[in-house]
Image (cartoon, rainbow, N blue to C red):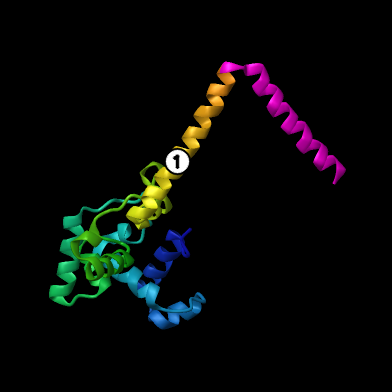
């Protein structure tokens, strides 16, 4: 939500333009902490009329070329943020601040629009597994392969025993389960 309403801005701008109070006295009269916003509103009004005081309801996307033109204009002419905003018919000089900062840090790449929100989970890979596999030496890889082969061999033996005599297999495992549960009960 905006700190000051459009009506308030219009009231102060017209009072400044047609009254006898300066920026500072007018700001004090309306208990504003600074006269800077009033100065910005007056400049915007003079350059763009009522549109300079209106708050845009929808976010407008600007092309990379438009942003680059605004930044280059400011750098080449030495214009202020407000002057640059007026020149490019923007009512928010903070846009220029963000664009200039991004341009200085990242160049033209910083002016490109980025997608918002969290990146999708499907693109992520399990970095822990990749690191673990990369760190293994040849000997460790062979040991790991041996262990997997031992596990596979044990599984196949159990599967063969089950196929040969399923009832005996179930009885053997039932006894183990009962003996384990009795141990837990007696503890």
**Residue 138 seen in this snapshot:** yes
Does the stretch in magenta take in 152? no
Residue shown at 19% from the left, 67% from the top? 71
- Residue 166: where, in percent of width, then height? 62, 17
Residue shown at 17% from the left, 77% from the top? 78
**Residue 21 seen in this snapshot:** no
* On screen, residue 167 above or below 119: above
Residue shown at 81% from the left, 41% from the top? 183
Main secondary structure found in the magenta portion: helix
SS at badge 1: helix
Tell whether 136 sits left or right of 174. Answer: left
- Residue 133: where, in percent of width, then height? 37, 51
> Depth check: 115 or 12 in front?
115
The residue range painted magenta reads: 164-187
The residue identified by callout 1 is 148
Does the stretch in magenta take in 169? yes
Kindly give the residue lying farthest to the left in the view shown.
76
Tell whether 33 sits left or right of 115. Answer: right
């Amino acid at each position: 939500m905006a700190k000051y309403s459009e009506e308030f801005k219009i009231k102060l701008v017209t009072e400044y333009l047609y009254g006898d109070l300066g920026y500072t006295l007018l700001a004090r009269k309306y208990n504003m902490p600074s006269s800077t916003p009033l100065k910005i509103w007056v400049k915007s009004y003079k350059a763009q009329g009522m549109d300079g005081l209106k708050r845009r309801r929808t976010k407008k996307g600007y092309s990379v070329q438009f942003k680059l033109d605004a930044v280059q204009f400011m750098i080449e002419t030495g214009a202020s943020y407000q002057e640059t905003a007026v020149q490019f018919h923007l009512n928010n000089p903070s846009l220029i601040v963000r664009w200039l900062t991004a341009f200085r840090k990242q160049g033209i790449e910083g002016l490109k629009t980025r997608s918002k929100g969290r990146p999708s989970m499907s693109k992520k890979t399990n970095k822990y597994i990749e690191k673990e596999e990369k760190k293994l030496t040849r000997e460790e890889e062979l040991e790991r392969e041996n262990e997997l082969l031992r596990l596979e061999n044990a599984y196949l033996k159990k599967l063969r025993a089950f196929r040969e005599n399923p009832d005996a297999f179930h009885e053997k495992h039932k006894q183990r389960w009962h003996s384990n549960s009795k141990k837990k009960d007696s503890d």
